[in-house]
Amino acid sequence: MAAFNVAMSAAATRDVAIGAAPARDGAAEHAAAIVEALLRSAAAAPTKGDSTSTPALLEACAHVLVQWKDTASFARMQGMTAAEGKGRFSLAQLKAAGYSARELRAAGFTAAELDGALFTTAELLAARFSIAELRLGGVTAFEARGAGFSAADLRRGGYPAVELKAIGYTAADLKTARFSAAELKAAGFHAAQLWNGGFTMADLKAGGFEAAVLKAAGFRTSDLKAGGFSAAELRAAGLNATDLRAAGFTAADLRAAGCSVAELKAAGFSPAQANDAGFARAEIEAVGVVRYSGGYDYGRFVDCCWR
């Protein structure tokens, strides 16, 4: 072994770049460079009386080759598949031996493992991992979008709306990708952005936007009513009986929302409409009515007006 060490040192000083090739898991290129250097040194070495003689250099060559035979590079040259090498060599060694991301995927390595072994996004894509596997493997939404995946693809892969919003997708884009209003609300989109992106008022309501927020954002009361908000919800949001009547709610709707006879009177409903809505005669009369010549029409307050 002493002769081997001296021979290696001598070969390295004879203007031969033993370390010129990168030592990638004892890869073929590196082993070949060392052996070539040693053989050229052997050719120039004295034949006897020197620890760096031809026999010593040839011994060094044999030692390098024996070491190389234990590498993934040599095993690959002998026909070993990535799957066969999985339990024998590390992922880093298999990558260094030249196995592609696709071969390693077929051998059972995950995208996360390959990403950790410094495969590029392009290599992971070439390995045909699914978008969900790529996400778990560390591929960002930005990288996936740059690789040609659509917003719908990213959604199927499990990327949240907040990440897609951060890389420039609009509410309209994400609606097309079948994200819900609730998901976009959670991602930080405003109601107006969703509305302009094609979501309906019913979508906004289902997505968790409250009537008060929508009213403050400038939406019309009629839009809120069309979206399914009840008179009670709108009244709780600060709308009065006049607003509710203008939006198309009936006297019965207002009574169900908790409005009083006085509020119906202020909104312009007649005593008869208040009576039809279910208010008792005593409640209506307490507000004050004026009877016309026709009388109450059997108590329905027809031909009456407010005092």
Image (spheres, rainbow, N blue to C red):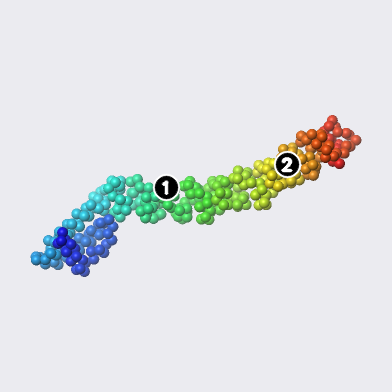
- Which amino acid type corresponds to the residue marked 2 in the rendered image? Phe
- Determine whether, in the image, residue 3 is placed left or right of residue 116: left
In screen coordinates, is 49 left or right of 175?
A: left
Where does label 1 land, which residue? 133
Residue 224, percent across and down?
A: 67, 45
**Are there few (<14), some (14-19), or many (20+) residues within 10 Å of tag 2?**
some
Query: Does dot 1 land on a helix, a strand or a loop?
Result: helix
* Residue 3 locus on image (x, y percent): 14, 62
Where residue 120 appears, x then y in whole percent? 39, 55
Mark 2 residue element: loop
Direction from residue 117 to residue 243 in the image, left or right:
right
The circle on residue 193 is: none
Seen at 60% across and 43% down, the residue is 206
In the drawing, what numbered circle is on residue 249?
A: 2
User: On the rendered image, what quadrant is the C terminus found in?
Assistant: top right
Which sits earlier in the primary sequence, circle 1 or circle 2? 1
User: Around disc 1, counting alpha carbons within 10 Å, would you say few (fewer than 14), some (14 to 19), or many (20 or more)?
Assistant: some
